[in-house]
Image (cartoon, rainbow, N blue to C red):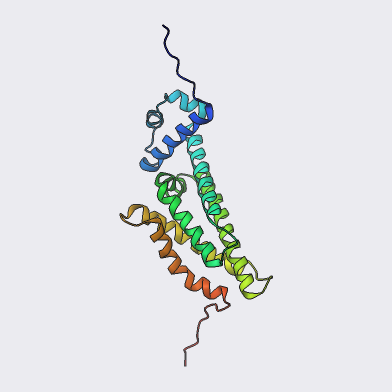
Amino acid sequence: MGAVKTKRMPRAVREQQMMDAAVATFGRRGYMAASMDEIAELAGVSKPLVYLYLNSKEDLFTACIRREALALTEAVRSGVRTDQPADRQLWDGLLAFFTHTAQNPDGWSVLHLQARTHGEPFAAEVAAMREEIVAFVTQLIVVAAREAHRDPDLPEREVAGLAEALVGAAESLAAWANVTPGVTAKQAAATLMNFSWAGLGNLMEGRPWVLQDVSG
């Protein structure tokens, strides 16, 4: 009786398997310390096969950044229902963001820590993802603010800075939550919601903060 042949794994499946191993290795070890030998061993393949499929360590890292960035932006977009009130849209977006980063800590480490500190090409990939998320959040706030004000011409620049600040706060809070025992995605989302909505809620209702002159 002849030996039983194992079914050959499709290329796409094999590539994802190797990228899963790469994200785990880059996320935990860092880009510089991670080796192709480690990645190949974790993926259960030979190092030449990793190079054959993904060319180089730099190309592999770039592919990991792009995959993780796409997964995060899709998670945030799919988590928001635009037919909901403004506060619910923001809550759903924050919850989707923190849930994804909590469930994928290695991917978040690749995006938030590794890619930003190891050269312009990598940082540019993350910057593109961040711009997309900021633009998405800006549009959520703009639409809600225009409806609240009954002003279809409310300029985006009035809320673009708020979206930028909100995304920056979410990034920092996710990094903190992922290394702080006991902090859930829901708790992180509630923390940022409580911090941000007082100001955003007033903006929606046409009551922006203004500096009161208390001199003299």
- Residue 200 coordinates in the image, percent (x, y): 52, 71
Outermost residue toward the bottom in this view = 216
Outermost residue toward the front in this view = 1
> Which residue is drawn at the image coordinates 40% and 27% (left, top)?
44
Q: Is residue 1 above or below residue 157?
A: above
Q: Is residue 60 visible?
A: yes
Q: Quadrant of the N terminus?
A: top left
Q: Nearer the viewer, residue 31 or 131?
A: 131
> Which residue is drawn at the image coordinates 43% and 68% (left, top)?
194
- Residue 30 coordinates in the image, percent (x, y): 38, 42
> Which residue is drawn at the image coordinates 48% and 20% (left, top)?
7
- Residue 206 coordinates in the image, percent (x, y): 58, 77
Outermost residue toward the top in this view = 1
Q: Nearer the viewer, residue 86 or 128?
A: 86
Q: Is residue 90 above or below residue 8?
A: below
Q: Is residue 31 visible?
A: no
> Which residue is drawn at the image coordinates 44% and 45% (left, top)?
107
- Residue 45 coordinates in the image, percent (x, y): 42, 25
Q: Nearer the viewer, residue 85 or 75?
A: 85
Q: Is 17 placed left or right of 133 in the picture?
A: left
Q: Is residue 96 above or below residue 27?
A: below
| Image quadrant assignment for residue 169 | bottom left
